[in-house]
Image (tube, helix red, strand yellow):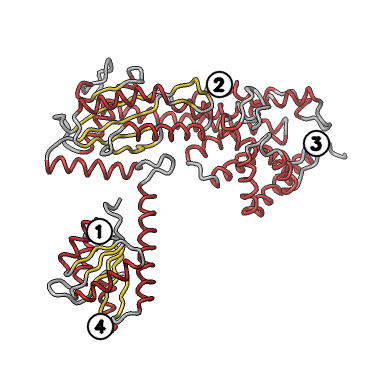
Amino acid sequence: MRPDLIDICVIEDDPAQRALLLRRMLKCEYTVVEAGDGEAGLLQIRSHQPRVVLCDLLMPGMTGIEVCQRVRADPTISGAYIILLSACDERQAKHEALRTGADDYLVKPYDVDELEARVRNGVRISKLQERLRRAALTDGLTGLSNHAEFRELIRREFARTQRYGGVVALLMLDLDHFKAVNDTFGHETGNVVLQDVARLLRGLVRDTDIVARYGGEEFTVICPETSVDDAAQLAERIRDTLGRELRVPSCSDLAVTVSIGVAATSEATVHSVSDLINRADHALYLGKRSGRNQVVRSDTAGDVVMDAGLEVGQLDRLQKQVVALSMQAKELCLQSIWALVQALEARDQHTAWHSRNTTFYVNTLAQAAGWSQSLRATVANAAMLHDLGKIGVPDRILQSRAPLSEADSAVLRQVPLLTCKILGPLRVFETETVIIRHLRERFDGAGYPFGLSGNAIPIGSRLLAVAETFDALTSARAHRPSRSIDGALEVIQAEAGQQFDPRFTDLLASVIAEQRDRWATRIRQTLAGLSRIADASQPSAD
């Protein structure tokens, strides 16, 4: 952020011209600083970081072009919008000024309205650049500094201690069992928890401390001029406050706790920014491994993990290998289970098509909603697997060509729960299983198995319910014809706020409006494929 909210810096060696510019800028209600030469002007720019610099081209000592070159060479002030003023109307002089880095060039005597318009444009562009810069450095969910900004700030604080002495401490925080919050109550509820953490952290730290979202459910606090003892006291205060005040909105009795690792540059083993981060991260890991909901100081944590006989670096490598193997195992499981889903096609011609289409629709909707790649992959897996429980449904129900009785319909409604029983032993599908388990919940709370409502229903379940219903409505069944895209959309929108999350019914409508031809082609291909299967299953006339 700029230290002072200064809009304009006027650099002009002629006192009368400078006074005239000042009056005009003040009349436009800009905040203004001034300088009579290039050197003084650079000092003003560095001190106040103005949005716009109005600089005379020809000045004794340092020309306007030299001022422009010096500003562009300094990354701390290079974003200033520079307008050079000159009595020279030669094209070559103008081209040189713009090539050197000036944003605009105005010839004296200038029109007052034109000057004000160009300054107004410069201020507008500067404000836009500042908003873009803040957006690039701010976590969109919590409003805290993001990971990139954290890296820059910790590097800056570390360099300061190296140059001038002193100490900087670092707190690494991780919410305990946060994945369970997302899986059980949905990512939107998890997002509310993260926002509450950010709010509480802001209220607990000093003005000079810097709170950042490190990633996921991890946060950091940079504490300039803070000893490891004082940092540990702050960490303990944070741990205690979050444990008492942080709650899951959908379940007020459920507290969320935090583990914290503390490190400081005063430790003998800290020689770089990476050392500082790694020491705090290692202390955090020990806190998580030792039971969570605690503060661990790096200077008392030791370099060897308890009872493991392994150095931290070796342990990290082993953890990464385990993660990689888990992902490979998950992919193999997916391939095997998908083969089972396709095998169901021999019993129920709609199942494999329905799983493929639902996966397509849910992935398209999740992408349009801006979900992360990992969340999109999880809900797509759930869409692929959600009908696996049909393995346990009798053929007379799956192959019925007449409208189903209420009892048979009740059996089909249990398919998601049957799927969860099948997937239960496979821990790699833990999150997908949660999504599938709550597929038949209703937004108004009248669904099952637990009668969850609103945001308490996992977000993946809410999106999957819309996608799955759309495909079911647009695919022909033996006992009913398929509906048109508009007809299916009308049915789903009529249930907005009752069966379905209104945001996702609106999302479905907007995506269909943008991709109608693509979705219509998908539906035609499905109907043609089902028709071919039906024809092949009919007995021969011979």
Which residue is label 4 attached to? Answer: 88
- CB atoms of marks 3 and 2 within 8 Å: no
- In three-dimensional space, the C-alpha distance between marks 1 and 4, rounded to whole angstroms, equals 27 Å
Which residue is label 3 attached to? Answer: 478
Which residue is label 2 attached to? Answer: 424
User: What numbered label is drawn on residue 77?
Assistant: 1
- In three-dimensional space, the C-alpha distance between marks 3 and 1, rounded to whole angstroms, equals 71 Å
Within 10 Å of the Cα at label 1, are there few (<14), some (14-19), or many (20+) other Cα atoms? many
Which element is circle 2 on?
loop
- In three-dimensional space, the C-alpha distance between marks 4 and 3, rounded to whole angstroms, equals 84 Å
User: What numbered label is drawn on residue 344?
Assistant: none
Which element is circle 3 on?
loop
Within 10 Å of the Cα at label 2, are there few (<14), some (14-19), or many (20+) other Cα atoms? some
Q: Quadrant of residue 496?
A: top right
Q: Is residue 310 left or right of residue 175?
A: left
Within 10 Å of the Cα at label 4, are there few (<14), some (14-19), or many (20+) other Cα atoms? some
Residue 66: horizontal and vertical position, in percent? 19, 70
- In three-dimensional space, the C-alpha distance between marks 3 and 2, rounded to whole angstroms, equals 32 Å
Q: Earlier in the sequence, mark 3 or mark 2?
A: 2
Q: Eyeballing the image, is 439 above or below 424?
A: below
Which element is circle 1 on?
loop
- Kindly identify the amino acid type of the residue bearing the numbered disc 4: Cys
Which element is circle 4 on?
loop
- Kindly identify the amino acid type of the residue bearing the numbered disc 2: Gly
Q: Earlier in the sequence, mark 3 or mark 1?
A: 1
Q: Eyeballing the image, is 63 above or below 391?
A: below
Residue 353 visible in rendering? no
Q: Earlier in the sequence, mark 2 or mark 1?
A: 1
Q: Quadrant of residue 319?
A: top left
Residue positioned 26% across, 60% down in the render: 78
